[in-house]
Amino acid sequence: MAGMTKGRNVYDVSKVVCQGHDLCYAEDEVIRRFLDSHSTRTMLGAESPRNFSLFLAQSDETSFLI
């Protein structure tokens, strides 16, 4: 998405600035807590002791979720 202004919501460019949330949505924190919970990890068989995090990878030309 060339030419996008940094700080804009990549899913809705009519929103001027994303405030306080990595991906511009308050639900991100709820999703992170769910994915990081012991019961979710147990159900999925995940053994990672590290915290799960959502982040947006950005380059000069594109933005994408990793």
Image (spheres, rainbow, N blue to C red):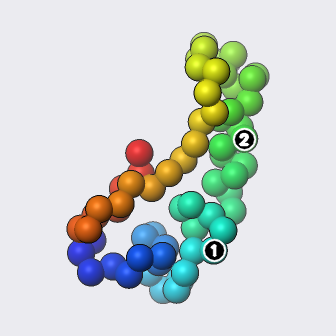
Q: Which amino acid does label 1 sit on?
A: Gln
Asked if residue 12 can be seen in this view, the reply is no
Q: Does residue 52 appear left or right of residue 12 in this picture?
A: right
Q: How many labels does the image show?
A: 2
In front: label 2 or label 1: 1
Quadrant in which the N terminus is drawn = bottom left
Label 2 to label 1: alpha-carbon separation:
19 Å
Q: Which mark is residue 33?
A: 2
Residue under the point 60% across and 14% down: 47
Q: Quadrant of the C terminus?
A: top left
**Quick one: label 1, few (<14), some, or many (20+) residues within 10 Å?**
few
Is residue 24 toward the left or the right of residue 36 in the image? left
Q: Which residue shows up at 71% across the image and 38% down it?
A: 34
Give the amino acid at mark 2. Answer: Arg
Which mark, residue 19?
Answer: 1
**x then y, percent, for residue 10:** 43, 70
Helix, strand or loop at label 2? It is helix
> Does the rendering let one see residue 40?
yes
Q: Position of residue 25 (x, y in %)?
A: 62, 64
User: Residue at 45% of width from left, 70% of height from top?
Assistant: 11
Q: Position of residue 56 (x, y in %)?
A: 45, 55
Residue 20 in the figure: left or right of residue 39: left
Residue 32, x across and y down, in percent? 66, 43
